[in-house]
Amino acid sequence: DIQMTQSPSTLSAFVGDRVTITCRAGQSIGSWLAWYQQRPGKAPKLLISKASSLESGVPSRFSGSGSGTDFTLTISSLQAEDFATYYCQHYYTDPFNFGQGTKLEIK
Amino acid sequence: EVHLLQSGAEVKKPGESLRISCKASGYSFTSYWIGWVRQMPGKGLEWMGIIYGGDSDTRYSPSFQGQVTFSVDKSINTAYMQWSGLKASDTAMYYCARPRFQGMGNSAFDVWGQGTMVTVSS
């Protein structure tokens, strides 16, 4: 299994802040990484695939980068609706494990 | 529009069996895999495995191998997950989700069901 480790587990920020969430894979996964947003009581939503490809309809303030083992999700200017939990997931070789999640809270 | 509609919430007793469903619409069911994801109360997402709609080829996470069984019914575009003996620790929300590229189990989940809450309590 490839383990995915996100940091931080919790992040407090203000509206308008720029924030970065990190995801590290236990071995190289190329660019086979996705980022999801989950709001309370809702199903996850795909934001980014292939490490840096923004999904249609996702605001451009979201961006992803990285390859190999180290990846980041950046939100350039936080909006109120961005406060949620974010998960990375690799899909290099099954099982396609998720990271443990990063909860983004309003400061 | 591509859509996954999951069956409703279930309340079961330990030891009981259960099958939950995920009905697909808006795309060719037999050309795509469907995955299952567990989320225990207050916890993160766990990848359980995937099943191919065309031939029922299945990949289980080692963490869930032997604990659940996936199946599909191509005639009604529906995927299932079943338990033969539920435990209290199976209490969770279960999501089905579709990888974005047909024929490829290894792609991101771009379509999700609304989730099925399973509660196991004596």
Image: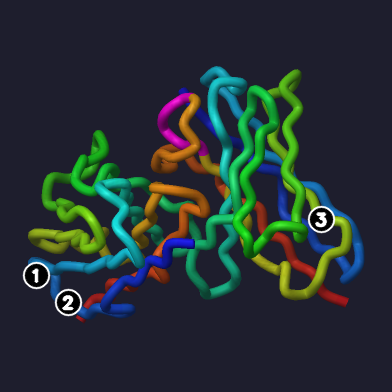
Q: Residue at x 9, y 67 (%)?
A: A18
Question: In the rendered image, which residue does mark 1 sit on?
Answer: A17
Do tag 1 and tag 2 residues touch (Cβ < 8 Å)?
yes
Residue A65: give x, y in percent of width and height. Answer: 15, 53
Q: Is the magenta stretch mostly helix, strand or loop?
A: loop
Label 3 to label 2, Cα distance in Å? Answer: 42 Å
Looking at numbered disc 2 in the image, what kind of residue is underneath it?
Ala
Q: Which residue is drawn at 82% across and 74% down?
A: B121
Do tag 3 and tag 2 residues touch (Cβ < 8 Å)?
no
A17 vs B118, left or right, is left
Residue B35: give x, y in percent of width and height. Answer: 57, 43
Chain letter, disc 3 residue: B
Disc number placed over residue B83 in the picture, else none: 3
Report the front residue among A85 and A79.
A85
| Numbered disc in front, either 3 or 2 | 3
Report the front residue among A86 and B67.
B67
Element marked by disc 3: strand
Label 1 to label 2, Cα distance in Å? Answer: 6 Å
